[in-house]
Amino acid sequence: MLDSGPQPTSPGETIVKQPYGLPRVWGPYDQLVVRFDPEQHALWYSLRPRGRPCFNLDLLDELRRFQHRVEQVNLGPGTDGESLPIRYMILASTVPGVFNLGGDLQLFAGMIRNQDREGLFRYAKACIDVLYPNCISFELPMTTITLVQGDALGGGFEAAISSNVVIAEESAKFGLPEVLFNLIPGMGAYSFLIRRLSPDIAERIIMSGELMTARRMQELGLVDIVVEDGHGQHAVEHFIRRHQKRGNAHNAMNRLKQVINPVTYEELITITKIWVDTALRLHERDLRMIEHLVAAQNRRLQQQKQQMEQDPPAALEGRA
């Protein structure tokens, strides 16, 4: 499991080491664990969702508040391109065997049954408001990194590949299962895939619902580094050490990519509107499939809880 640094002084409080005037406490957060590595100028933030390991609305709100705080720190007085307090942001997870299972399917099913267009769009926009800053590195000379230790499905897949760099452990699995219930991913998947793959391969990944290994993702160019289980955190730290030697060139290359083939906020929002339209046309059999997947997620969560109670070290085995 990722080291979360100093222990919170009260429930929900997140402690961050204090370099360069960074506030000691960022939060409080209920569903995030945050720590700062001052030597590497690296900010780790790990998902710790309540209940099923998906992007619930409260988690999305916390993520955006957290990002806003990062923006304030890096754009604060006395900072410039050479002295940003935060130069690397690493997205990870505290859940054994799971990076993130994606959207809140139970919430989706309820809103679709109620034909709640506004609610669906509000949720989709909340996702985009988190993923977009990550994919453009906050328009700052920063590098965003995802560490995947476990399953990254649906919105978890989208979140993972929204970063500049993706590092995965050997047992990680990736997939976009939305087609199983007659839907498509709508929070960035196609936009991110099409920047790295040919259109036909991107479409095949979306329409097949295939579950892919970390090695397969690396072959496709969607994962940059694959390491043995339990070595993920060390791999990130090693990558940063190498990256820092040519950080100026890497940051310039990220800017070039965004100039030549930009992912725009407008593009992402337009796609979410198509996703909402499509979701509202789902049939009852599709909604039953969604509920079947929710039940499977709940069973998995319950099994993990039981394993933690019976043998905590085994439940956490392989976590960095």
Image (cartoon, rainbow, N blue to C red):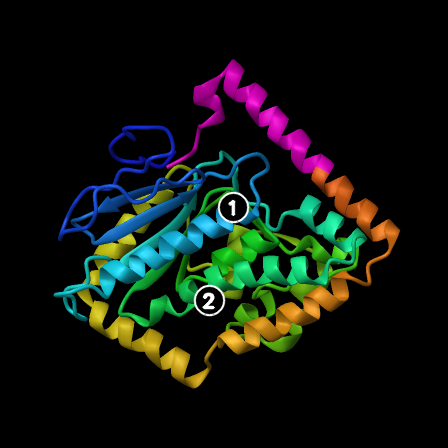
Q: Could one spot residue 90 in this view of the protein?
A: yes
Q: Confirm whether residue 87 shows in the render.
A: no
Which residue is labeled 2 in the image?
132
Q: Position of residue 70 (x, y in %)?
A: 30, 57
Q: Amino acid at mark 2?
A: Tyr
Q: Amino acid at mark 1?
A: Asp
Q: In which image quadrant can residue 318 be found?
A: top left
Q: Residues within 10 Å of mark 2 (few under 14, many from 20)?
A: many
Q: Position of residue 309 (x, y in %)?
A: 52, 16
Quarter assignment of residue 246: bottom left
Q: Is residue 201 left or right of residue 282?
A: left
- Which residue is found at the position 52% from the left and 51% from the top? 214
**On screen, residue 269 above or below 74:** below
Per the rendered image, the range of residues in magenta is 295-320
Q: Is residue 152 above or below residue 128?
A: above
* Number of marks in picture: 2
Is the stretch drawn in magenta largely helix, strand or loop?
Answer: helix
Tell me the element at label 1: helix
